[in-house]
Image: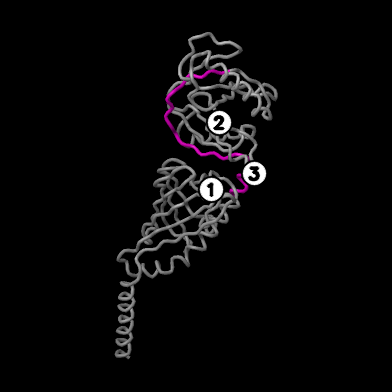
Amino acid sequence: MTRFLFGLIRLLAFFVLLLLLIAVFLPSDAHIERSLIIKTVPEVPYNLINRLEDWEKWSPWHQLDPKMKIQYEGPPEGNGASYSWKSDHDKVGNGKLRIAASRPYDYILMDMDFGEGGPARCGFYFQKTDEGTEVKWTIDTDAGWNLPGRYFILLMDYFVGPHFEDGLANLAELSGKIAKRGYTMSLEPSDFAGMNVVYIDVSCTEEEILRVPAVMHAKIISSLPEMDVTMTGPLLVMREGKIGNLLQMKAGIPISAKPKAALTDGMKIMQLPPGRVMLARMNGLPSVISPAFPEMKKEILKWKLKPSGSPWECYISELNNRKDPLENRMEIYWPVQ
């Protein structure tokens, strides 16, 4: 009996050594990727990935274990945002991810640490197409001289690939719901240099917000030569509240200097002072973004900041009712401290 056990141990040791020897010749690194066309502009899926709390809405691993424990650190989105997770589910485990680099609507790169599974680099890439946006999800990892880990590398596409496919499908479904809302928004603190603005007070309904301010903008632009100033930035609007169903706003143009001549035809001058602002990059039409302002105020508090003045919106693209309203781009600046 002892002889049999000794022989069995020797046989097992031989197989272990054989497996380790084979592992020496196996690849140590792996690259996995999946892609999907999502029928909307790049901003929608980009924002859902760049804001880590939104992962709970589409990530396949959050669906595998809705009870996993999550701890967020750093800013809510963008560079430096991170979270760690703990799960008893064998397909989720424990780990941490951190956004290492992101360029709006082009890519997001993340450093991931799976604990005993080792580190990895995850990437999301966004390419606008005629059908919408191609979102590519990749992961790269290297087992190094962890010889048992090389067997997992060999099977990694089999284990991870289907989860990527599920995640992209979830992302597409959620992106469709967001697109129906009519606007997207991503935030980051920024420094504002200050500027002079010529403006005209405006009252109009939400439905008229494309037409009425545009008339005032055109009126100001035609008067710039008489003021001996030049336009230095995009058209802007500052919403000041409502009287009945009418929005009270300032429709303005940033200018190079204070006009020397007296202003006429209801035109006035104001200075937007330099300072810290929360910058919101928006997609949509001005007529549908009113709900974005209270949402933005809540997000500012999550950044551990507080509003310190009135926000204003700048129209980065020429606003019109395009085939996809989300192709219209705006920026909202909200002074904070």
Quadrant holding the C terminus: top left
Residue at point 38% right, 60% down? 141
Query: Which of disc 3 and disc 1 is earlier in sequence?
Result: 1
Q: Quadrant of residue 29?
A: bottom left
Vertical arrangement, residue 222 with respect to residue 137, above or below: above
Nearer the observer, 336 or 115: 336
Nearer the observer, 54 or 331: 331
Structural crowding at the residue carrying mark 2, measured as other residues with C-alpha within 10 Å and reported as few (<14), some (14–19) or many (≥20): some
The amino acid type found where label 2 is placed reads: Tyr
List the residue tagged with mark 1: 128
Residue at point 42% right, 54% down? 122
The amino acid type found where label 1 is placed reads: Lys
| Relative horizontal placement of residue 18, taking residue 227 as reference (left or right) | left
Nearer the observer, 131 or 171: 131
Vertical arrangement, residue 304 with respect to residue 47, above or below: above
Quadrant holding the N terminus: bottom left
SS category of the residue bearing label 3: helix
SS category of the residue bearing label 1: strand
Q: Quadrant of residue 203?
A: top right
Structural crowding at the residue carrying mark 3, measured as other residues with C-alpha within 10 Å and reported as few (<14), some (14–19) or many (≥20): few
In the rendering, which numbered label is found on residue 315?
Answer: 2
Front label number (1 vs 3): 1
Residue 208, percent across and down?
A: 68, 27
In the rendering, which numbered label is found on residue 180?
Answer: 3
Query: Which of disc 2 and disc 3 is earlier in sequence?
Result: 3
Structural crowding at the residue carrying mark 1, measured as other residues with C-alpha within 10 Å and reported as few (<14), some (14–19) or many (≥20): some
Q: Which residues are magenta?
A: 174-199
